[in-house]
Image (spheres, coloured by chain):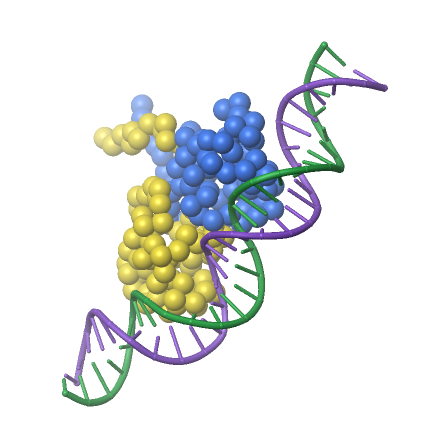
Chain colours: A blue, B yellow, C purple, D green
Amino acid sequence: MMKTIVRNRKELGEKIRNMRRNKGFRQIDLARKASVRQALISELENGVTSARCETVIRVLAALDMDLAIISRRKAEFNPMVY
Amino acid sequence: MMKTIVRNRKELGEKIRNMRRNKGFRQIDLARKASVRQALISELENGVTSARCETVIRVLAALDMDLAIISRRKAEFNPMVY
DNA sequence: ATATAATATACTTTTTATCGTATATAGTAA
DNA sequence: TTACTATATACGATAAAAAGTATATTATAT
């Protein structure tokens, strides 16, 4: 899987929606796994709310994902090994 | 720079404090750059508050860092190239 | 078209983040 | 010690997230 930078709530929401669908989850499934309301998942995915960081971490964990901090200066060089 | 996973507010705070010090910033410097109070930086670094995701993104941006989503299943295999 | 499932929206209440501001505490010189 | 700097804490006010719950809207069937 790729690392995906998220710089605003819209990007975060899109990413979460994609990952949820990839796993065949409904919003209600993800909500239960993360112990939040289905409505919150909807709001998150649509960028309606700027969720708390801990909430995002819980939702991502339910999707088997992690939140990470990376440097912008990171040389995005991933050499293929021949 | 390494990618650093953050799974709770404590880890996030530690990471932010480290990065701030690496750059020789005082809390007040970082606060101004991110348009928040010095007190908020203190609270963030000490894990006193679970900041909003957008706030974290602003603070990280002021540190030249990005928030990213990564898969837990990612094979953490970064081969050396000889 | 009707029924059903999934998602989005709405409303009130509770909880929490953030602010402004001020001060207390801790750290660092001189 | 004294002065100064940096960080932590406090408190009231405001704004926003999240809850519970319900319903509206949209999508997907049959």
Query: Of residues A23 and B2, which is closer to you in this image?
Result: A23
Give coordinates of residue A11: x percent, y percent. Answer: 54, 42
Q: At 35% from the left edge and 42% from the top edge, which residue is drawn? A: B7
Q: Residue A50, relative to residue C25: is it above or below?
A: above
Give coordinates of residue A65: x percent, y percent. Answer: 41, 34
Q: Residue A33, relative to residue B33: is it above or below?
A: above
Query: Of residues B77 and A8, which is closer to you in this image?
Result: A8
Q: At 36% from the left edge and 34% from the top edge, which residue is drawn? A: A78
Query: Of residues A32 and A81, which is closer to you in this image?
Result: A32
Give coordinates of residue A43: x percent, y percent. Answer: 59, 42
Count of numbered labels shown in the rendering: 0
Q: At 56% from the left edge and 27% from the top edge, which residue is drawn? A: A26
Q: Residue D12, relative to residue A52: is it above or below?
A: below
Q: Can residue A2 be seen from the camera position used here? A: no
Please state, as top left, top right, bottom left or bottom right, where the C terminus of chain B lies in the image: top left
Q: Residue D15, relative to residue A45: is it above or below?
A: below
Image quadrant of residue D16?
bottom right
Q: At 47% from the left edge and 36% from the top edge, which residue is drawn? A: A35
Query: Of residues A73 and B52, which is closer to you in this image?
Result: B52
Image quadrant of residue D28?
top right
User: Quick check: B14 left or right of B34?
Assistant: left
Q: Can residue A37 be seen from the camera position used here? A: yes
User: Quick check: D6 left or right of C19?
Assistant: left
